[in-house]
Amino acid sequence: MKLSRMCPYELLCIFVMSGFLSGSVQKSNLPKGDADNGGLFLPDGFEAVVVADNIGHARHLAVNENGDIYVKLTYAKQDSGNAAIRDSDNDGKADHIAYFGDYEAESGYGPTAMKIYSGHIYFSTKGAVYRQKLTPGKLVPESKIELVLTDNYISEHIGKSLAFDDDGHMYVNFGSISNNCQVDNRTPESPGQYLCAELAEHAGIWRFDANKLGQTQKDGLGYATGLRDGIAMDWNHETNTLFALEHGRDDLHQHWPSLYSEWESAMLPSEEFFEVKEGMNGGWPYYYYDQLQNKKVVSPEYQGNDLTKEVAKPANPIMGFPGHWAPNDLFFYTGSQFPEHYKNGAFIAFMGSAGRAPYPQSGFFVGFVPFRNGVPSGPWEVFADGFAEKDTIVSSSDAAHRPMGIAMGPDGSLYISDSVTGKIWRIIYKESKENFGKNQLAKMEKRKTLTHLRTPDKIKDNLARNIANEGQKIYNLYCISCHQKDGMGDGSRYPPLGKSEWVIGDKKRLLKVLLNGLKEPITVNGKHFNGEMPKYNFLSDADISKVTSYIRLNFENNAGAIQEKEVANVRGKLKDKK
């Protein structure tokens, strides 16, 4: 692979691959799949080739009509944020990579969308949506980057995914700024705000003029509300409607231990799949969908409120997936390369859970939902699996790869991006489409019995059943979903605890963080993290002593314990200041 450096800027990675002709699919023009399908398990007849790897933490991707592929990165690579990559000889492998792009300083870090619309690539950060006109025949666009939309972003859910209809509209996800709109965010038994004020500007989808520059949220139309974080979106051109999957709320057991068991907290709430029509209300934060009961239920924060007076009746999803699978991209397949079974159906990239402890993490695959006449025609299926490279996944950081983005090439090939190392797979089908059917699907159906896809056993799959250390028990209850079992964080929002000055340094600073929480971004070992940490002042001095001692003596730390009286001293001084 030949690398060329273009411009020393940040955050967007544009991955470009050429060599395909538009029109009907010629199987002889399709590249040969890798011997091991790039580590993926696919239905018989499908092949996969790894186009590129280690391009950076990849997010969404898009493919141009000439076969060029554009990929969005979470962080800059080689001091640059954009990259263009091309396959010159059509062997399925990238040959050239060039990094370029300049827009990050104005809008803050944070990854999300990559779409192609009306001759432009559209991409977003947590604070803005940009576009750049594609330059015919050029690997790297030579046009200037234009600012389409700006937003005064607030954590928690910053992803601004995009979708475009056929009438010149752009749809933008504005995620919620809290877990479930509590009075005290992420605090056990804190009631919900009623009414939830953040719904005015968050937890919904807004529609904008796709061709207008310099917009703010006020220029858009509030198209749908009650969606906690609808990051997986796509426009269905068969139904001429928008579809989206949202990320459900976290920590039912941690926040409401008298109402939910650890198992229920791992399974619930559902990741909801909606057909989103104008005016739709998904129900968040007042309701969530319980896929075990197949119905909407009232969130625990709002069980004492009469929701019939002020809250519109929530829409039911067209399908509910198990909790915390993290659906991060949605694509309706319109190509002709794949068997007819997949035509107009929905591919979904489930990045995989981080909040199922003490049970194994789940997801980490690309699913498929067959559609007929604009509605699901069968249950969800496993289409591509093997990304994690292991079955029992204790922490999300154990997964070797996590599927993030989905896009289709002009020949009908499907492209999948990986958020861990930046691997890009191209999935192709060269066998007889007429011979594809129940046997191939039945083989993939068996994968639903694997640990990372099946419903966990309430007792046998509880990874914490033998834990004796009291500090570790507290850590597993309140900390593990963000900082993970190995203390390494999720690599994106939540920082590692091992060898961190925030942990092994000043004891008082660590205790103040636990007692007061932390809303501002921090830097740990040279990397920025912006995940909000709630207050844990509801824990007793003894419990805080145990859990801080545990993290200071584990995860390759050897900083010494914190005594209960030290906690009491810091807590007392904080109260005196008030």
Image: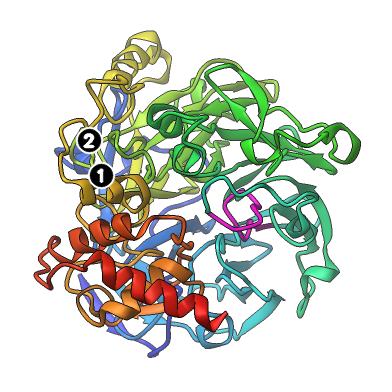
Q: How many marks?
A: 2
* 214 with respect to 246 (left or right): right
Q: Is 167 situated left or right of 139 in this image? A: right
Question: Mark 2 sits on what residue?
Answer: 464
Q: What type of secondary structure mainly makes up the magenta span?
A: loop
- Write the residue at 67% across / 22% down: 375
Instruction: Give the image location of residue 501, x and y in percent.
Output: 23, 80
Residue range corresponding to the magenta coloring: 173-186
Residue 493 point in image, percent of width and height: 41, 64
Q: Is residue 489 left or right of residue 549?
A: right
**Mark 2–mark 1 distance (CA, rounded to whole Å):** 8 Å
Res. 549 image quadrant: bottom left
Amino acid identity at mark 2: Ala
Identity, as a three-letter code, of the amino acid under mark 1: Lys
Contact, mark 2 vs mark 1 (Cβ under 8 Å):
yes
What secondary structure is found at the residue carrying circle 2?
loop
Asked if residue 478 can be seen in this view, the reply is yes
Question: Closest to the observer: 401 or 370?
Answer: 401
Query: Which label sits on residue 482?
Result: none
Kindly give the residue lying farthest to the top in the view shown. 438
Camera-side residue of 82 and 216: 216
Residue 473's tag is: 1
